[in-house]
Amino acid sequence: MLIKVKRGWETPESAATDEGVYLERRQLCKAIAAGPILLAGGAPAAALAAAAPKDDPTADLYPAPRNLRYRVDRPVTEEKFATIYNNFYEFGSHKRIAKAAQALKIRPWQVKIDGMVEKPMTIDFDTLIRKMPLEERVYRFRCVEAWSMTVPWSGFPLKALVDFAKPLASAKYLEMETLADKETMPGLRQFWYPWPYIEGLTVAEATNELAFIATGLYGKPIPRQNGAPLRLVVPWKYGFKNLKSIVRFSFTDKRPKTFWEVIQKREYGFWANINPKVDHPRWTQASERVLGTNDRVPTLLYNGYAEQVADLYKDIKGEKLFM
Ligand SMILES: Nc1nc2c(c(=O)[nH]1)N[C@H]1C(S)=C(S)[C@@H](COP(=O)(O)O)O[C@H]1N2
Ligand SMILES: [Mo]
């Protein structure tokens, strides 16, 4: 039994996470069908919790305390769907890469922090994570291909890493890079893709309260197929911005050339903010299929996070913000 120091936003029942509670919550949501739903409490959560992999050196950090500020009025996607239907082109350009991704070597894992920072460094993931304030957040997630899910990520605000990195005032963007390892990633043989997978945010976006680095999923260390040991989560942007298995955070004054932008700039831009009224050139973005169900639901502006992020864009003119 883990004893944790309670933070202000923590309630007793939020200290543990498990699929059972989510399932129960799902039923609850179906029954109520409208309005914000409180997290199910009172279930013997700890007793139901699935075990974290014992050989993971961060296993003791999970489940992280849930931050109740970040919850949504949608049922949480069942773990089995979020962990078998994935996009991770390094392991193949289709959705069934979970098995192949088990080849990913996640220890030792070095993270480089460089570019326009006070002091460039390379830090071991296990050292880094223990310097960061871990919590759990339930977020919506919307892929540009018009499927969506709702999952509990564990991790820390990207802002905590930015503060730790101490960028210079001249830095305007944060460029991030995924591991590119030919030995374990068969997708890299598809040489026409511009490896490594690069993504980027403005520093203002990176320090927005919603920008999150996930190290866990469903109250356990994050599975390889979902981007172990650390991946970006920016829920107001299309899925492809949420790069996986990050090895480098680099501060720069030049806008990064992102992976999908290099492949097809007319379809996948730098900003990629979610907007149901701005269609993809080849399909509508008005609605989305809910992963693991036959439901289609309307897509929301900024994926439902306008309150937190709309201000970031109010002074930006002449940019394709929703592409
Ligand atoms: N390195 C890397 N990160 C990636 C991708 C990828 O192919 N490679 N695919 C992206 C896309 S298109 C989506 S929708 C999400 C999927 O995340 P999930 O598999 O955890 O649901 O990962 C994103 N991050
Ligand atoms: Mo995606």
Image (spheres, rainbow, N blue to C red):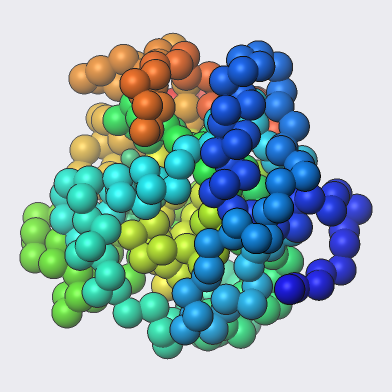
User: Which residue is at a point 41% across and 84% down the rendered structure image?
Assistant: 107
Please name whichever residue, 232 or 193, is drawn nearer the observer in this view of the structure: 232
Q: Position of residue 215 (x, y in %)?
A: 54, 64
Where 141 falls versus 189 (above or below)? above
Determine if residue 61 is in view. Answer: yes
User: Ligand 2 quadrant?
Assistant: top left
Using the image, determine if residue 288 lies above or below residue 124.
above
Tell me if residue 67 can be seen: no
Q: Horizontal and vertical percent for residue 208?
A: 68, 46
Q: Which quarter shows the N terminus?
A: bottom right
Quadrant for residue 104, please give it: bottom left
Left or right: residue 39 compared with residue 31: right
Return the x and y of residue 201 as percentages of the image width and height: 51, 49
Please determine whether, in this image, residue 306 is positioned above or below residue 58: above
Q: Nearer the viewer, residue 44 or 151?
A: 44
Q: Position of residue 255 (x, y in %)?
A: 44, 50
Q: Is residue 96 left or right of residue 226?
A: left
Identify the residue at horizontal 62%, vertical 34% (top origin).
25
Residue at image coords 22%, 56% = 97
Q: Residue furthest right?
A: 8
Is 281 left, or right, of 9 in this rendering? left
Q: Between 270 and 95, which is closer to the camera in this rendering?
A: 95
- Name the residue: 54% across, 54% down: 218
* Image quarter of residue 27: top right
